[in-house]
Amino acid sequence: MFKRLFVSLGLTSLISGIFALIFISHWILVFILAFIIQLVAFYFINTTIENNLIEKAEKIKLEQFVEANKQVAIIECPCGDKNKQEVVMRFDKDIIYQCSKCEKNIKAMINVKPVLTTEPIYFDR
């Protein structure tokens, strides 16, 4: 960790020194100014790149979440061809899909049935 820090500071100092040699009369002032400009510029570049990577990761995470929570049902077309098709089911809007064989628009409805649940009785033997 410290090796990378020292290498980075060394390269920054070297580039600042080379740039300062161009203006030999004000060498130390140009060196300090070039050093600070490099630190600030690369800080902003690094922050921008890091924010872009975080944004892309969040988008991928959201897409994975949406894909994992997708409810798919296999529905048979009522036209009589016994064509089965996967349809994404949603409760918040009507489900209208097109049959791949007869190419008719078909509306799928979600039915909710109440079912009485019982708890099993286990006997000791």
Image: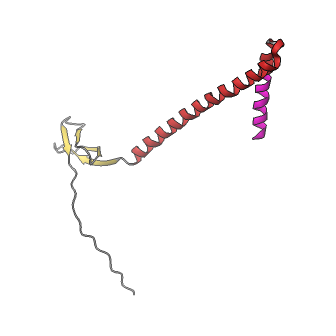
The extreme bottom residue here reads 125
Residue 117 falls left or right of residue 8: left
| Percent position of residue 7, x then y | 78, 32
Instruction: Report the number of discs.
Output: 0
The image quadrant where one finds the N terminus is top right
Which quadrant of the figure has residue 33? Answer: top right
Q: Position of residue 75 (x, y in %)?
A: 25, 47
Between 62 and 116, the one nearer to me in the picture: 62
The residue shown at (23%, 66%) is 115
**107 lies left or right of 89:** left
Magenta region, mostly helix, strand or loop? helix
The answer to whether 123 is drawn above or below residue 105 in the figure is below
Seen in the picture, residue 91 relative to 60 is either above or below; the reply is below
Above-or-below relation of 27 to 106 = above
Q: Quadrant of the C terminus?
A: bottom left
Residue 103 location, quadrant:
top left
Q: Nearer the viewer, residue 91 or 12?
A: 12
Q: Residue at x 79, y 17 (%)?
A: 20
Q: Quadrant of residue 124?
A: bottom left
Residue 77 left/right relative to 15: left
How are the residues colored? Answer: secondary structure
At 29% across and 49% down in the image, what residue appears? 73
Q: Is residue 121 magenta?
A: no
Verify whether residue 11 appears in magenta.
Answer: yes
Of the pair 86 and 16, the residue shown nearer to us:
16
Give the residues drawn in magenta, as a range.
Answer: 1-14
Percent across and percent down for residue 76 are 23, 47
Q: Position of residue 78 (x, y in %)?
A: 17, 45
